[in-house]
Image (cartoon, rainbow, N blue to C red):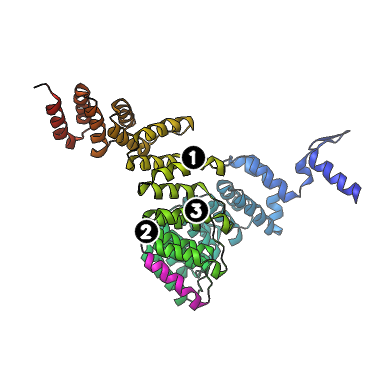
């Protein structure tokens, strides 16, 4: 056994071993034939020419005539490695070499498209199946619907679902689940609920995935009440809610600021024998942020380790925003400063939330320091951070920095709103920069911000010598 183990280890670590008269032993030569062909196809890249693919397949096409399952294995391997174009080429070359193409081959190729977000190629392959004398089945359609779902093509997904019975391919739970998810991404919550009801009517039993997708659709459509109603009815149809269902319901409440309900759902997960995760906790904290409950947001954040949930940056950002929105700038900055201790690196969302806290707390000096720290963290100030910076500079009369930030926005093609421009004007006005105020007016006029003209004339009139 030790010798056998050693020889296997040697084979793994030595890809080329010289032999007199026989050349070198390669790693591919140690693999079974089907693995060799897959590895060689993968080495050709995502879009190889047909002749190179044909050169790899070679005699395998003849072998597949007697054992078509080998072709299915290879196409499944291409799907796992996300090579949809190569899978489509293999199908075409099989047909041209008079090797039978079956429904499993086509379904595997469509699955490759689904895994690669190539919904258009998936549709092409589905429509090409009759040309191979293959009738699509529920697996072919399900894979294509999933591809459309990932490509945000909800209308096409629903069209395929309705087409299935006409082609004698009865939809299954996978077909429906993908279609419901497509509706969720397309903000079509009513259609998602219709599909959920349709499943039971057609004898297809919804599972936890069906319900979680429908609840998510309700959340996307800001219909938290319907989402909670779906969750509450699941035990009646003997489907136990899982973590995904609860997370979807908490997120639905979060979008509408229903912090009490979000907190209750999170608190009730252990009673359902479900373990909260970072999504559950972050959504609940965000719900508290929108509900102006900064203290509860902090409590939830600090309680995450007790739930054996690792604190994530998204959770901290929501808590920083919750504190900032309520003028708790000290707490917001404390959270920001403690991120490295939690092995978390602040991002632009973290800094923007802290800037917002400084602005609401009239802490313009701290906000300016924070803007400077962003560059040290190699964070590029975006439109949100720059506009927040302009507003706090307006509070402190720091006209140079306000104008600099404003000019950066204009140079990058952004059109600042009236509040931002007014803040820049206010900074210049407080510093007595009348000429600069006039130049700003010309800049605003050139960028078609007409609503500021009257305000600018008033500022100029007040600061002009009498």
Location of residue 303 in the rendering, given as x and y in whole percent from the top left corner: 53, 56
Q: Is residue 47 left or right of residue 430?
A: right
- Stretch in magenta: 223-238
Residue at 51% across, 60% down: 130
**Local secondary structure at mark 3:** helix
Q: To which residue does mark 2 refer?
A: 257
Please tell me whether residue 197 is drawn above or below residue 301 in the rendered image: below
Please tell me whether residue 47 is drawn above or below residue 426 in the rendered image: below
The answer to if 225 sits in the magenta stretch is: yes
Q: To which residue does mark 3 refer?
A: 301
Contact, CB < 8 Å: mark 1 with mark 3? no
Residue nearest the observer in this picture, 168 or 293: 293
Location of residue 161 in the rendering, given as x and y in whole percent from the top left corner: 45, 65
Location of residue 200 in the rendering, given as x and y in whole percent from the top left corner: 46, 76
Residue nearest the observer in this picture, 286 or 398: 398
Q: To which residue does mark 1 refer?
A: 337
């Amino acid at each position: 056994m030790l010798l056998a183990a050693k020889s296997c280890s040697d084979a793994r670590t030595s890809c080329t071993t010289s032999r007199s008269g026989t050349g070198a032993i390669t790693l591919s030569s140690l693999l079974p034939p089907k693995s060799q062909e897959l590895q060689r196809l993968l080495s050709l890249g995502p879009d190889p020419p047909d002749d190179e693919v044909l050169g790899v397949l070679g005699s395998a096409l003849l072998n597949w005539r007697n054992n078509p399952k080998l072709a299915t294995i290879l196409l499944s391997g291409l799907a796992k490695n996300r090579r949809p174009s190569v899978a489509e080429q293999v199908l075409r070359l099989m047909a041209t070499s008079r090797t039978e193409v079956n429904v499993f081959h086509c379904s595997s190729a469509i699955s490759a498209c689904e895994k690669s977000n190539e919904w258009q190629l998936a549709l092409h392959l589905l429509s090409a199946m009759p040309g191979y004398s293959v009738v699509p089945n529920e697996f072919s359609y399900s894979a294509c619907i999933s591809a459309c779902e990932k490509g945000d093509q909800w209308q096409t997904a629903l069209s395929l679902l309705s087409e299935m019975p006409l082609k004698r391919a009865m939809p299954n739970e996978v077909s429906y689940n993908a279609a419901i998810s497509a509706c969720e991404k397309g903000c079509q919550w009513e259609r998602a609920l219709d599909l959920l009801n349709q499943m039971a009517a057609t004898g297809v039993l919804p599972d936890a995935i069906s319900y979680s997708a429908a609840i998510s659709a309700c959340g996307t459509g800001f219909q938290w009440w319907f989402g909670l109603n779906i969750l509450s009815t699941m035990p009646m149809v003997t489907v136990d809610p899982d973590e995904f269902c609860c997370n979807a319901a908490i997120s639905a409440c979060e979008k509408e600021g229903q912090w009490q309900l979000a907190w209750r759902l999170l608190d009730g997960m252990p009673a359902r024998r479900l373990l909260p995760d970072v999504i559950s906790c972050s959504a609940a904290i965000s719900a508290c942020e929108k509900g102006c409950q900064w203290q509860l947001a902090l409590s939830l954040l600090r309680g995450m380790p007790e739930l054996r949930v690792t604190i994530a940056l998204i959770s901290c950002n929501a808590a920083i925003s919750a504190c900032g929105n309520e003028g708790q700038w000290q707490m917001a900055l404390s959270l920001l400063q403690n991120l490295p201790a939690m092995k978390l690196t602040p991002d632009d969302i973290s800094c923007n939330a802290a800037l917002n806290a400084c602005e609401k707390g009239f802490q313009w000096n701290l906000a300016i320091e924070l803007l400077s720290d962003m560059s040290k963290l190699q964070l590029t100030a975006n439109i949100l951070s720059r506009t927040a910076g302009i507003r706090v500079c307006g509070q402190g009369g720091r006209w140079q920095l306000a104008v600099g930030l404003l000019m950066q926005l204009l140079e990058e093609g952004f059109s600042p709103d009236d509040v931002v421009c007014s803040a820049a004007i206010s900074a210049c006005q407080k510093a007595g920069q009348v000429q600069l105020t006039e130049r700003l007016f010309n800049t605003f006029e050139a960028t078609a911000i007409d609503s500021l003209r009257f305000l600018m004339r008033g500022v100029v009139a007040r600061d002009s010598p009498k």
